[in-house]
Amino acid sequence: MIGEAAKLLARSRFAIAFTGAGISAESGVPTFRGFNGLWKMHRPEELATPEAFRKDPHLVWSFYKWRMDLIRKARPNRAHYALAELERMGILKAVITQNVDDLHREAGSRNVVELHGNIFRVRCTSCSYRENLKESGRLDEFLKERDLPKCPRCGSLLRPDVVWFGEPLPRKSLEEAFRLAERADLVLVIGTSGVVYPAAYVPQIVKETGGKVIEINPEESGITPIADVFIRGKAGEVMGELLELVRGLANE
Ligand code: APR
Ligand code: ZN
């Protein structure tokens, strides 16, 4: 299986990756639906929706500050680094991710499309103010702040710049993702249950336009039925091995 995947990857003209929470599981970031998934401890309706935020912004901010603190302590794992290396080798053209943990960028990937936003970015609920707290260096003080965060420009409430259930995805990112999927002749699907749309269309578009689908997951997912190659395993282990095989083929 993995040998076949390495051959397809080495021969591809325009390969992309489509990733979900599972790629960050080995970095210690809990997934949503799998074992010990986040949504087991909290019901998504209570936390990741505009209604929940309107009803109880303190509860929603305490959930996101807990996740921001947990994620900023997380480090990319071998799978993130392998994707960055495949991009440097000119094989991988982009990473399209559902994750908001910024770990692909931290691992060195440059062409990253974030479909569900970024947990370190906040935006104003009224004006167009946006801030990436990691880049502005205000993350520490922001996490210590007890009061609800307010916009420095207009004083309105700030919210996490992530996509909540029932909200539209950022149009630009979605269009870019679909354009990449149409061009791709191969998609590496890593660590996603493939049940959340429209993100889950990405591998289907690659398939429909004649591309190959390679999936890496310890369990089957909503994408497995269209996978040309299904590698049952953890992202870090499999991607480490896959990178070595591709390196070997590239040097032939
Ligand atoms: N390596 C690879 N895959 C893994 C690993 C691992 N070490 N551990 C778990 N997985 C797989 C699980 O088998 C599961 O298929 O990762 C997947 C995680 O699925 P979800 O928790 O549903 O995460 P995801 O698919 O990214 O969810 C999509 O739903 O909650 C919303 O916006 C949120 O972006 C998220 C979206
Ligand atoms: Zn504002």
Image (cartoon, rainbow, N blue to C red):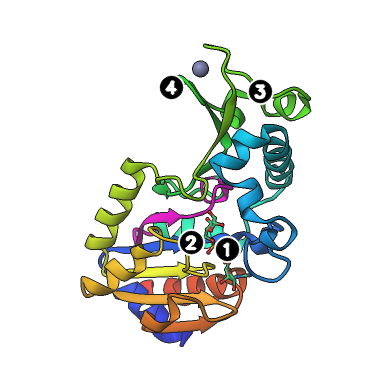
Q: What is the secondary structure assignment of the residue under circle 3? A: loop
In the image shown, does 22 or 50 lie closer to the viewer? 50
Q: How far apart are marks 4 and 1 (CA)?
A: 32 Å
Q: What stretch is highlighted in magenta?
A: 88-105
Number of the front mark, 2 or 4:
4
Position of residue 11 in the picture relative to residue 241 (left or right) = left
The verdict on label 1 being within 8 Å of ligand 1 is yes
Say above or below: 219 vs 153: below
Which amino acid is tagged 2?
A: Thr
Which amino acid is tagged 4?
A: Ser
Residue 134 drawn at (x, y percent): 61, 31
The verdict on label 2 being within 8 Å of ligand 1 is yes
Q: Which residue lies furthest to the bottom in this view?
A: 1
Can you identify the residue that label 1 sits on?
Answer: 23
Which amino acid is tagged 1?
A: Ile
Earlier residue among tags 2 and 4: 2
Can you identify the residue that label 3 sits on?
Answer: 149
CA neighbours of label 1 inside 10 A, class few (<14), some (14 to 19), many (20+): many
- The residue under the point 36% across, 80% down is 226
- The residue under the point 40% across, 64% down is 200
Can you identify the residue that label 2 sits on?
Answer: 19
CA neighbours of label 3 inside 10 A, class few (<14), some (14 to 19), many (20+): some
Which amino acid is tagged 3?
A: Pro
Can you identify the residue that label 4 sits on?
Answer: 128
Residue 181 drawn at (x, y percent): 29, 61
Q: Distance between the residues labelled 2 and 3?
A: 30 Å
Earlier residue among tags 4 and 1: 1
Number of the front mark, 2 or 3:
3
Quadrant in which residue 248 is drawn: bottom left
